[in-house]
Amino acid sequence: MTDTADKDALVLFMPSGKRGRFPVGTPVLDAARQLGVYVESVCGGRATCGRCQITVQEGNFAKHQIVSSNDHISPIGPKEERYDRVRGLPEGRRLSCSAQILGDLVVDVPQDTVVNAQVVRKAATDRVIERKAAVQLCFVEVEEPDMHKPLGDLDRLKAALEKEWGWKDLLIAPHLIPQVQSILRKGEWGVTAAIHRDMDSSRPFIVGLWPGLKNEAYGIACDIGSTTIAMHLVSLLSGRIVGSSGTSNPQIRFGEDLMSRVSYVMMNPDGREAMTKAVREAVNDLIGKVCEEGGVNRDDILDSVFVANPIMHHLFLGIDPTELGQAPFALAASGALQYWAHDIEINVNRGARVYMLPCIAGHVGADAAGATLSEGPYRQDEMMLLVDVGTNAEIILGNSSRVVAASSPTGPAFEGAEISAGQRAAPGAIERVRIDPVTLEPRFRVIGVDKWSDEEGFEEAAGSVGVTGICGSAIIEVVAEMYLSGIISEDGMIDGAMAAKSHRIIPNGRTFSYLLRDGEPRITVTQNDVRAIQLAKAALYAGIKLLMEKQGVETVDTIRFAGAFGSFIDPKYAMVLGLIPDCDLAKVKAVGNAAGTGALMALLNRDHRREIEETVTRIEKIETALESNFQQLFVNAMAMPNKVDPFPNLAKVVTLPERKVLADDGGEGGGRRRRRSRD
Amino acid sequence: MTDTADKDALVLFMPSGKRGRFPVGTPVLDAARQLGVYVESVCGGRATCGRCQITVQEGNFAKHQIVSSNDHISPIGPKEERYDRVRGLPEGRRLSCSAQILGDLVVDVPQDTVVNAQVVRKAATDRVIERKAAVQLCFVEVEEPDMHKPLGDLDRLKAALEKEWGWKDLLIAPHLIPQVQSILRKGEWGVTAAIHRDMDSSRPFIVGLWPGLKNEAYGIACDIGSTTIAMHLVSLLSGRIVGSSGTSNPQIRFGEDLMSRVSYVMMNPDGREAMTKAVREAVNDLIGKVCEEGGVNRDDILDSVFVANPIMHHLFLGIDPTELGQAPFALAASGALQYWAHDIEINVNRGARVYMLPCIAGHVGADAAGATLSEGPYRQDEMMLLVDVGTNAEIILGNSSRVVAASSPTGPAFEGAEISAGQRAAPGAIERVRIDPVTLEPRFRVIGVDKWSDEEGFEEAAGSVGVTGICGSAIIEVVAEMYLSGIISEDGMIDGAMAAKSHRIIPNGRTFSYLLRDGEPRITVTQNDVRAIQLAKAALYAGIKLLMEKQGVETVDTIRFAGAFGSFIDPKYAMVLGLIPDCDLAKVKAVGNAAGTGALMALLNRDHRREIEETVTRIEKIETALESNFQQLFVNAMAMPNKVDPFPNLAKVVTLPERKVLADDGGEGGGRRRRRSRD
């Protein structure tokens, strides 16, 4: 039955699908190595680390012409038996360094080989990242010193690492040199070296050394945001996330938003030092938190990847961000940077490294690069719009042929600032709003309360948290619903004539407000609130349109919302409001902390570092302020959803108010560009 | 007359002798670059640094078929005129970046272009070391930031260094990253970068950055001896030595000799730290001393090379030397090592590097490697013996085909220790001795006194310093003279029968002594003193013989004495005593601190680093203690000059006492080896 024309056996590795023929007797690990199938191993084939586990899939795989069976692999020998006795081998699992190929096989390489099974896997990201970490653990047996061969202990260690693992031209972290002799003797000449193979110097480095077998190493992936610092702690050997946590950025005490922090540096002689110290301390504290969560010693952290916006990037690295506060917004360094963690006071293993993703531009930082790496517009053919909304929105648009990027100063309105009843997302904040188009009566939901405001028992349920304000996602919804119900016109005016129809339209000086909740506090949406949202969304949309023009497209195929804001808003309302261009709603997706996911990818697979470094050099950066038609695009985008752009996909699911036909779209730039006729 | 078959001019560079044809109008500097002639330049052809000076040799160079004339070079233009006005150009000198080739030329590249001529050249070494320093200064003009091209300031600096100087894949010392922006702006976008092109990581590194033109950089070459630390301060641009000094090693307070320092480490918990701190402090103080001497700011020191014996090597680098105190004498690291100077607490420029020469073996250190680099036995065909005598003698023997090395435990006798009247070389110490073979009366010279002791006015002249003891060189001479005058026999016994002939032979218990000076103090040479010298010289000679046997030679062609001891002893007496094998005395040379010279070579020319790294891997190390015939060679070498070896060259200049013909040379090993018959 099996396809054995010659004496070699046919072996198929899953899930990679790589296959090849190997002589009977070949260890499965060797076969995997020869095919370039990644199977971890620390002990170098001594059947002690348990990292190289595989399973045999039994059955007739007709498509591959393989009949695979456990009879086609060598029986468990003494080494595997010993491992099973001492550390336990799960049912069906084999150590591929010991198990030999006896016949045709389909071999499954588990994506997450749990060796010390005390930690629960976190669902921080649902993606499987192919493991190719910068740090590899390698156990070796080193020759003892010999008076006839006067090579030093370090030099014999290097020779052993070259002979057993193929590492050539190894360097060593200087702090380890004085420890080499005692570690070799403590390990009775058997030691585990951590090899960093992604140093910016390109030669492999010994960054850690332990007596005997060291079977675990960790890394951290961290996103330093202006408001929040988020971190994953992950096993570099299995890829398991063993801890994920966040903390608020203590720099908030120096200034709520980025520009006020730059001002603080400019006004205070020690301002830069103080903010650098604050953010590094917060990162160190957060490391302690994720280590506690994962039951990990911080000394076992050997690698780290950081992303941040440009100002956080500079402050974290001890660079004065003043230049970023004024044109031409010059970054001190835009390329990827590497450090010893120790050099920037990150308190982990003394040999650990820091990799900082490249920045795209003075306002589009390493965090945007991380999100780009995570979502990969350049990896696919659809025109992808990737938006990360904060006080500054980063916008990436592109596909495999071309990627363009810009930032747009949306201001803090989307985060609830500058809104009369705005507040952060916290219990008591209104997070969802609906307005009856006939009665103009609202109903809403509040964070921390399950019921809608018009459901029975809502007031009782809301009693403890209260109804305290409107958070970012609800601001989008309430303005959108006000537009859909006719309370505000396309140009954003609250229609005072409606006051006759509903008590919820109330005069407020020379303008009108919408009464969302009559109580304590009284929550209204004022004309100024609507204006603030209009300005913010117009800035975002104009930036997006500018990039669409650069790309020569009038629609996008898919939209990714990165960041916390993206996770909470309803894409439909974002589209009604005209934050984002028209698109099939099924193809609008919130992707959470994509910047952090990008950091994680760069941590677990060093190929992703080269990928984003190379990608960033190709991304075309558009400075919105320098584009002559930005102003016109902005004016058009003040209207809801837009003065000139059609929203056919949105119209399929939402009944938009009837739009007036404009004879002329006016303005300086609009008239010169080709536009589709309004539908 | 001139050979101008085509329109190109023929240009010959001296002293390199490189020549080539170049189109009329080619700047002389470009022609030199194209031929690989090393001409320094910092400003990159802007005629501001003055480093690229050359002169034109006028005349008819028939051998080269060149008629060279100052008419064949472009007249001084406005740039050179400006340089001459501002900084002064010596008569006849031209700036090769500005001067263009107009016709055939013989161009002289001065070996030491003095730009800031305030410092006197030191004759620390008479050798011309081809300059190819690890650090190069490069002035560049950097593009200003532009909103349309969001590359960071550092990234634009790198791009400028690649464009103007050809540096690819540049890295930067992390401490400079936060300074890049302010330095660029202070220099109005013109900055000088120090590029280190010999980092162990192999990629070029920006290690220093200054606004505007930085036109000087220094390095230090240092030999850390057990007793003395010696240092040169040298311009990396001109090769000029601007300061040379020494200091005693403060570790002496922890133990006079190396093994007592190892014991100190073993007995005291903080012993290693204390000794590391002491030697680093001494090095830092010495840097201050040479900087003061040279009028140099220590912050302008950008590179350093260190040599040391293995125990000093380890203590300097913060490595516990305990393993070096016991078999198998394992070095922690034998290969060359590099550090940031800052990492090992050497207080110079923050971006300066430390290069540590490789060690040859557990008892043959980086100092021996330095001496090997300096004298270069492997660079020539003669069989060269290189000896560095201290309490441990390092012996290197070889030529271009093969080099062998060993160390021999000579003990401290040669340094005056273990000798009853021994003392260090200091005013009052006897340094030269002659004994009248008829009367057995001595005459001697004393350090600090010009006259010999038998000259009129000696006592008055010696009055202030006194006659206090015998230093190392005189111990060699007095024992040799005692042997030549028949006071001691070939086997080293002071002949008591001589007491009848001279009052200078005096009984001393069961043996006799020779009265060298009757006074206060009374200075005698005892039988024990003679024995101590015999043991020391036998150890050295047996080691040398062992290497000669490994090489299969019975004579050496040339002998080099390295170290202070070698500078003071008279080779003739060393040979009479049998410290060294017979050799043409004209080919025995004291080479001073060859280890330090080797460090200087590695500092000024990075090719020498590769040269010694590669050489050390090929040197065969002989462990004398493990060689079965060492004992017999040692026994033979106890006799003067030697029990079995002939000294024909020595016999030509010195009348050796008649030697008894031995029927049998006895002992375990001697009889088995082929020997030449005695002459």
Image (tube, coloured by chain):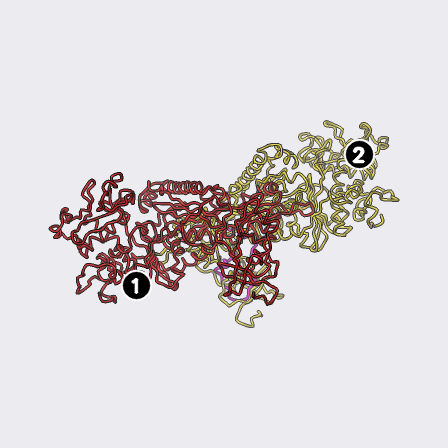
Chain colours: A yellow, B red
Residue A437 seen in the figure: yes
User: What are the residue bounds of the magenta stretch?
Assistant: A91-116
User: Where is B611 relative to A176, above or below?
Assistant: below
Q: Chain of mark 1?
A: B
> Residue A519, position in %: x, y?
74, 27
Taking depth in this image into account, of B586 and A588 the one nearest to the observer is: B586
Which numbered disc covers residue B330? none
CA distance for labels 1 and 2: 113 Å
Number of numbered markers: 2
Q: Residues within 10 Å of mark 1 (few under 14, many from 20)?
A: some
Residue in the foreground of this view, choosing between A8 and A1: A8
Please tell me the numbered disc located at residue B555: 1
Residue B307, image x and y in percent?
Answer: 40, 50
Residue for point 15% across, 53% down: B495
Amino acid at circle 2? Glu
Q: Do marks 1 and 2 share a chain?
A: no
- Count neighbours of disc 2 (C-alpha within 10 A) and say few if under 14, some if 14 to 19, many if 20 or more: some
Q: Is residue B23 left or right of residue B446?
A: right
Q: Residue at x 25, y 63 (%)?
A: B648
Where does the N terminus of chain A fall, quadrant-wise? bottom right
Residue B626 falls in which quadrant of the image?
A: bottom left
- Tag 1's secondary structure? loop
